[in-house]
Amino acid sequence: MMNEFSIICRVLGSLYNRQPQDPLLVPLFSLLREGKLRQHWPLEQDELLQRLQQSSDPQVLAADYNALFVGSDCKVSPYGSHWENGPQESEVRLFLQSRGMPLTDVPADHFGALLLASSWLEDQSEADESQAQIILFDDYLLPWCGQFLGKVEAHATTAFYRTLAMLSREAIQAMRDDLYEG
């Protein structure tokens, strides 16, 4: 059974990391459209989840996703290494490899990939992995995610991605607070 932290990271990471029409996201978008994600969502974010639900047609979202995150002329780079306070891809890759995470050739400093990596670290749940998650958040995610999410909010043409940015900001802060308290 995945814990709450892992669920949040997996859902948010997947929505940033994959095209909305990706077949792997079909079950997630079905949960969203049917209003069933809320019953599995561990944070008090019902209003934002409802707003996501109202604008969750993957075909409509594809153009916005591509304009925001895909290609060299995208409006908001999802890669930490493209941001002033973001990490270098090689640093992130080395850190994750040192934790035993299997990596592909896909850049490890992608916003969605970092959230998915945090879920992976949580699922490994060895005694020192909360320390690894704190490092991941403090060194590789938090220094630039506020700017990134602000730009997503400002440049998104759909309510879905504007809302996703707000939901992500609150969720990341709640998870970080939880890591400190844990």
Image (cartoon, helix red, strand yellow):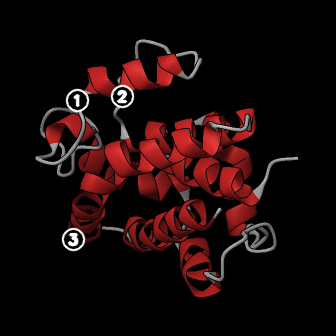
* Between discs 2 and 3, the one toward the N terminus: 2
Report whether residue 71 is seen: yes
Q: Earlier in the sequence, mark 1 or mark 3?
A: 1
Mark 1–mark 3 distance (CA, rounded to whole Å): 25 Å
Residue type, mark 2 in image = Val
**Mark 2–mark 1 contact, CB under 8 Å?**
yes
* 116 relative to 109 in the view: left or right: right
In this picture, residue 78 sits left or right of residue 95: left
Q: Which mark is residue 92?
A: 2
| Residue 19 visible | no
Residue found 38% across the figure and 44% down from its top: 111
- For residue 88, the mark is 1
Q: Residues within 10 Å of mark 1 (few under 14, many from 20)?
A: some
Q: CA distance from mark 2 to mark 3?
A: 27 Å
**Residue 157: x and y, percent?**
29, 67
Q: Outermost residue toward the right?
A: 1
The picture places residue 32, in percent across and down from the top left corner, at 68, 65
- Where is residue 82? Give x, y as percent: 16, 38
Q: How far from the left and from the top, in percent, is residue 85? A: 16, 48
Of residues 165 and 91, which is closer to you in this image? 91
Give the structural element (helix, strand or loop) at label 3.
helix
Depth check: 24 or 84 in front? 84
Q: Amino acid at mark 1?
A: Gln
Residue topped by disc 3: 154
